[in-house]
Amino acid sequence: MRIAIFGSGGVGGYFGGRLAQAGCDVTFIARGEHLSAMRDNGLRVDSIAGDFILDKVHVTDDPKKVGQVDFVICAVKAWQVASAAESMKPMIGDNTLVIPLQNGIESAAQLAKVLGADAVLGGLCALVAYQALPGHIKHIGANPLIRFNRIDNQADVRVYHLSDALNRCQGVKSSIPNDVNVAIWQKFLLISPWSGMGAVSRAPIGVLLKLPETRQLLLGSMQEVYQLAMALDIKLADDCLQKTIAVLESLPESSTTSMQQDMAKGRPSELKEQSGAIVRLGNTLNIDTPINWFILDSLGPQELRARGVLNF
């Protein structure tokens, strides 16, 4: 089993590192100082599930040098997926499967447009990890979970082979959802309202939940996502809002999202793929999404500044 990790930051570095640690044939696609450090010194992962160091790893910035693989784990930011799809073409064979792990609901469709629907699964993960230094990943929160399946939810032995390989890794749990579209929307219901409200307020989840005003806005944003899912016949559970709030309440009060962190540091973020996706889909379905409209428009100037469009 040959596996390529396209995007070797917190998510890709962690899951790829665990697969390599377990003896799988893994090649990392990286760039810049991260590429150089991994090439020279391997990969270090500090994890609440157990630290480890890989003295040598296969790493390159050129997918053409990798050749065709069995699986590609796509772990770039959501706004990088379209360009990543073009770049990974040399690694895609007739039996290759690509697993997107981005926050959002559009990555699988973007990949399928370039690579073909048969080559792309639906996927998601739960993990709080980041690149601390070149060649160094830190996993600081959440029990690492990765879930994926065919978009049509039909049985595919290749899906089971990869899930089994992941479940043999220390510090990883993998499962195959009966309906991967429901699983993706369940995560979207949690992450996008939290990301948007966190970025607007610049407050951690504990504060968002504690203050009645921000808690109500958070819940209202979730309700907008739920309405979109219902309109698309995504069969979310009737109590999914309450369960999502309960999950957020179980997190450390200081927790923030990657989108919130990117915006706070002036970096390009997944605003368009999270809050923006809610607004775009609401327009298409003629469903009002006023809270997410407010979030999107309020954060728009910061996003344009991060991308060099505005200077202030």
Image (spheres, rainbow, N blue to C red):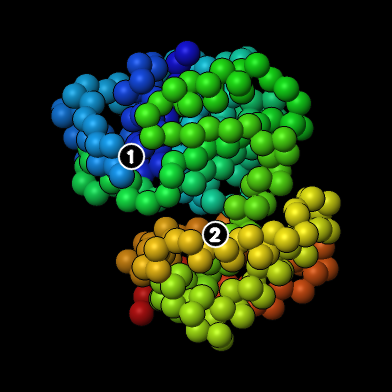
Across and down, in percent, residue 41 comes to 16, 29
Q: Residue at x 45, y 61 (%)?
A: 251
Q: Is residue 205 visible to the viewer in this orientation of the structure?
A: yes
Tag 1's secondary structure?
loop
Q: Residues within 10 Å of mark 2 (few under 14, many from 20)?
A: few
* Residue 301 vs residue 129, the one in the foreground: 129
Residue bearing mark 1:
49
Residue bearing mark 2:
247
Q: Residue at x 52, y 63 (%)?
A: 248
Q: Residue at x 78, y 50 (%)?
A: 234
Across and down, in percent, residue 97 comes to 59, 24
Rendered image quadrant of residue 204? bottom left
- The disc placed on residue 170 is none
Q: Residues within 10 Å of mark 1 (few under 14, many from 20)?
A: some
Indicate whether 5 appears above or below 125: above
* Residue 83 vs residue 202, the one in the foreground: 202
Indicate whether 255 appears above or below 312: above
Which image quarter is the C terminus in?
Answer: bottom left
Q: Residue at x 75, y 53 (%)?
A: 236
Q: CA distance from mark 2 to mark 1?
A: 20 Å
Indicate whether 271 appears above or below 128: below
Horizontal side of 28 relative to 117 (left or right) equals left
Q: Tags 2 and 1 in contact by the CB under 8 Å rule?
A: no
* Residue 123 vs residue 84, the one in the foreground: 123
Q: Amino acid at mark 2?
A: Val
Tag 2's secondary structure?
helix
Rendered image quadrant of residue 266? bottom left
Indicate whether 12 appears above or below 130: above
Q: Amino acid at mark 1?
A: Ala
Horizontal side of 210 relative to 20 (left or right) equals right
Q: Is residue 130 visible to the viewer in this orientation of the structure?
A: no
